[in-house]
Image: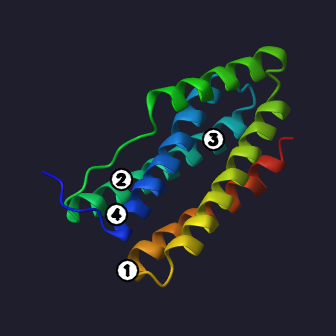
Amino acid sequence: MQQTKTREAEMLEELYKNVKMGSDSIIKLLNKVSDGKFKTDLTDQLDGYENFAAKAKDRLKSLGCEAKEENVMTKMWSSIGMAMSTLTDSSDSHIAQMVAEGSTMGITDGIKLLRDYENTGVSEHALALVRDVIKFEENNLERAKKYI
């Protein structure tokens, strides 16, 4: 039985969905990459997403809530979009562009979460997690630029 959602739980649920979507995307793209260094960078990025997902999930559990991933349709359309995009161009440069676009979306989503949930009673610990994800995504964006 889930207690009434708090603002913090709402924010953490969105953060969890975002980092899990990033993780799922990297998993789908990883086997298409030929450059060893790029593959290593993506593996590091995957580890980061999984680490943030675990932190959000643990915090949600401590609030009596369950972490849920994006719905099946959203995940399916994302997979189809990636498959179609790499069907026409599976070069490392194109994949790096896709990763950069995903990280840009992650930055934007994180900033929106901060704006929507700052000063609403959400703990500083949870807000710091969002800030850490934004910094992580900014770093991912810079790393991806090297391969475009």
According to the picture, the residue beneath numbered tag 4 turns out to be 9
Residue toward you, 1 or 134: 1
Q: Residue furthest front?
A: 4
Q: How many marks?
A: 4
Q: Quadrant of residue 142?
A: bottom right
Residue 55 pos. (x, y %): 36, 59
Label 2 SS: helix
Which one is closest to the eye, mark 4 or mark 3?
A: 4
Q: Amino acid at mark 1?
A: Ser
According to the picture, the residue beneath numbered tag 2 turns out to be 54
Instruction: Looking at the image, tell me whether mark 4 or mark 3 is earlier in sequence order.
Output: 4
Residue 66 pos. (x, y %): 26, 50
Q: CA distance from mark 2 to mark 3?
A: 18 Å
Answer left or right for 7 relative to 138: left
Q: Are dots 2 and 4 in contact, CB under 8 Å?
A: no
Instruction: Looking at the image, tell me whether mark 2 or mark 3 is earlier in sequence order.
Output: 3
Counting other residues with Cα less than 10 Å from the Cα at mark 4, is it few (<14), some (14-19), or many (20 or more)? many
Q: Which mark is residue 42?
A: 3
Q: CA distance from mark 4 to mark 3?
A: 29 Å
Residue 120 pos. (x, y %): 44, 81
Q: Residue at x 57, y 47 (%)?
A: 44
Instruction: Looking at the image, tell me whether mark 2 or mark 4 is earlier in sequence order.
Output: 4
Q: Amino acid at mark 2?
A: Ala
Q: CA distance from mark 4 to mark 1?
A: 10 Å
Q: Amino acid at mark 3?
A: Leu
According to the picture, the residue beneath numbered tag 1 turns out to be 123
Q: CA distance from mark 2 to mark 1?
A: 18 Å
Instruction: Looking at the image, tell me whether mark 4 or mark 1 is earlier in sequence order.
Output: 4
Which one is closest to the eye, mark 4 or mark 1?
A: 4
Q: Residue furthest top?
A: 87
Label 3 SS: helix
Q: Which mark is residue 17?
A: none
